Amino acid sequence: MQKGTAAIIGGGVIGGGWAARFVLMGWDVRVFDPDPEAQRKIIEVLANARRSLPGLSDVALPPEGTLRFHDTMSAAVDGADWIQESVPERLALKHKVYQTLQEHCAEGAIIGSSTSGFKPSELQDCATRPAQIIVTHPFNPVYLLPLVELVPTDKNPPELIQRAKDILTGIGMYPLHVRAEIDAHIADRFLEAVWREALWLIKDGIATTTEIDNAIRYGFGLRWAQMGLFETYRIAGGEAGMRHFIEQFGPCLSWPWTKLMDVPELTDDLIDAVAGQSDAQSGMYSIRELERTRDTNLVTILRGLKAQDWGAGKLLNAQDARVAGVPALPDDLTRPIVTVERAVPLDWTDYNGHMNEARYLQAFGDATDRMMLLVGCDADYIATGGSYFTVETHIRHLDEVHAGAVIRVETQVLLGEGKKMHLFHRMYQGDRELATGEHMLVHVSLETRRACDPAPHVAGTLARVASAHTALPRPEGAGKAIGVKG
Ligand SMILES: NC(=O)c1ccc[n+]([C@@H]2O[C@H](COP(=O)([O-])OP(=O)(O)OC[C@H]3O[C@@H](n4cnc5c(N)ncnc54)[C@H](O)[C@@H]3O)[C@@H](O)[C@H]2O)c1
């Protein structure tokens, strides 16, 4: 994975999220923000991100980069490969910021703007080197949501656009190349349309903030999260598909269903109604509590989509594959083999606030899968009709572990002979032993569903590992049954 130095100019809601994503993806980050509270806020955002982002991945992320705060913009951008501007949405302020930072940053650095609405040509106006500036508009929380709208102009060289895409992909994002610049890019156009309709519904006394949120989160919001608009409507057209859908709902376009271009005036009464209803709906939670709830929910949804290899989940799987590389047996077989290295995901924790006991088995199951893969029992081999089934498991829970912590499973082959594969897994956080898992597996024919010998190349590799591991001391706890003291 490509790593470098990122300068974050403006460390508020969005800049803090960028800082957290870059740091957790191994980049060194330098922040400039004149607000004396910015450091505290970013450290809090980073804590939330540490709890949620690493566990989205099923493989270990690179070691964290460093996070430094600078008193001047010139010190922050000096030597930076990527500069992310996230100052308030005022064009004159953004122009002023570009003037100063272009005096000090490298000519080859990329300057991405988080602007929600300005076109890149507006940002490039009056800049010393317009070719360096593009829009890279993210979504909150930047450390969890993959979308970033990348909007260039014809002043940006193709090489810079490609480099920007590669860097954003490298930090786990999906750069959506917006081919023509328009106000508010693509996604914020939808958000603005829905926002306008919602304000009308409140102003006209049709619905409250809670009722509007329920209409979204219990219904179409769930559809949008996994298929978007057009794929969802294609299904809504039934077997006749999209053409039928348009025939059926096309006439509504001329009915008074929407007040899109008719904007309600933001009177004091309307603001009081929206803010008051929102207080009644969510005022019992602090913003930090709401952020944590949002992050836990997002992680749960995203990991569900990962299991389906669909939508944003498919992006995350592709990122895992890039980070993990091709699995291979280590050259040195005289030590146990690292079969799992990952952070504990938020959705693996329970009411006690620590990793649920079932997830210990999941981590050991993943370690077993990896061991099978390393000895040659991979997808191609399984397609030929052979596999291993687990017939017995014994887990000892030795210590607790929390969301975001990096766990490592080391596997020792106790026996790899004939139909049998006897594994002993040890789970650690750093040097702290968390659990052991002892598993007996039997090789089976997927046709007869009965035990049989593995193919020679699988048997041979497994025997080689088992033979090397016989030199290791027998692990403490191996062969143990549940002990009753007293
Ligand atoms: N909030 C969102 O949901 C969202 C989403 C996507 C994009 N954006 C865009 O991101 C940008 C920042 O928005 P935000 O919501 O993070 O705002 P914010 O008010 O939370 O943060 C802005 C930060 O910029 C700092 N700042 C002000 N002047 C500065 C200067 N001269 N140099 C460096 N820092 C300076 C402020 O102290 C503040 O911490 C805007 O362009 C906005 O359109 C916001």
Image: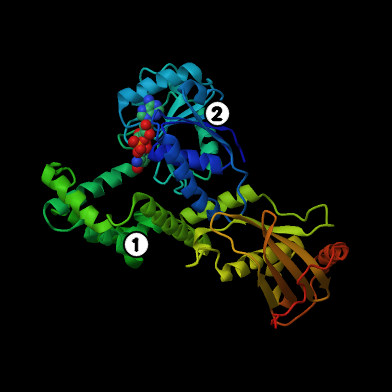
Instruction: Say which residue appears at 34% left-offset and 54% top-offset.
Output: 229
Instruction: Say which residue appears at 39% left-offset and 45% top-offset.
Output: 140
**Cβ of disc 1 within 8 Å of ligand 1?**
no
SS for callout 2: loop
Q: CA distance from mark 1 to mark 2?
A: 47 Å
- Labels 1 and 2: the sequence-earlier one: 2
Quarter of the image for residue 224 reads bottom left
Quarter of the image for residue 152 reads top left
Identify the mark at residue 18; answer none if there is no mark: none
Q: Exactly how many numbered labels are in the figure?
A: 2
Quarter containing ligand 1?
top left
The three-letter amino acid code for the residue at tag 1 is Gly
Identify the mark at residue 81; answer none if there is no mark: 2
Q: Nearer the viewer, mark 1 or mark 2?
A: 2
Residue 100's place in the image compared with 116, above or below, is above
Q: Is residue 70 visible to the viewer in this orientation of the structure?
A: yes
The three-letter amino acid code for the residue at tag 2 is Asp
SS for callout 1: helix
Q: Position of residue 207 (x, y in %)?
A: 17, 58
The residue identified by callout 1 is 241
**Cβ of disc 2 within 8 Å of ligand 1?**
no
Which quadrant is the N terminus positioned in? top right
Instruction: Say which residue appears at 11% left-offset and 46% top-offset.
Output: 269
**Residue situated furthest front in the rendering:** 486
Circles 1 and 2: CB distance less than 8 Å? no
Horizontal side, residue 54 vs residue 409: left or right? left
Q: Position of residue 18 (x, y in %)?
A: 46, 39
Q: Name the one closer to the observer, 378 or 332.
A: 332
Horizontal side, residue 142 vs residue 257: left or right? right
Q: Position of residue 438 (x, y in %)?
A: 72, 72
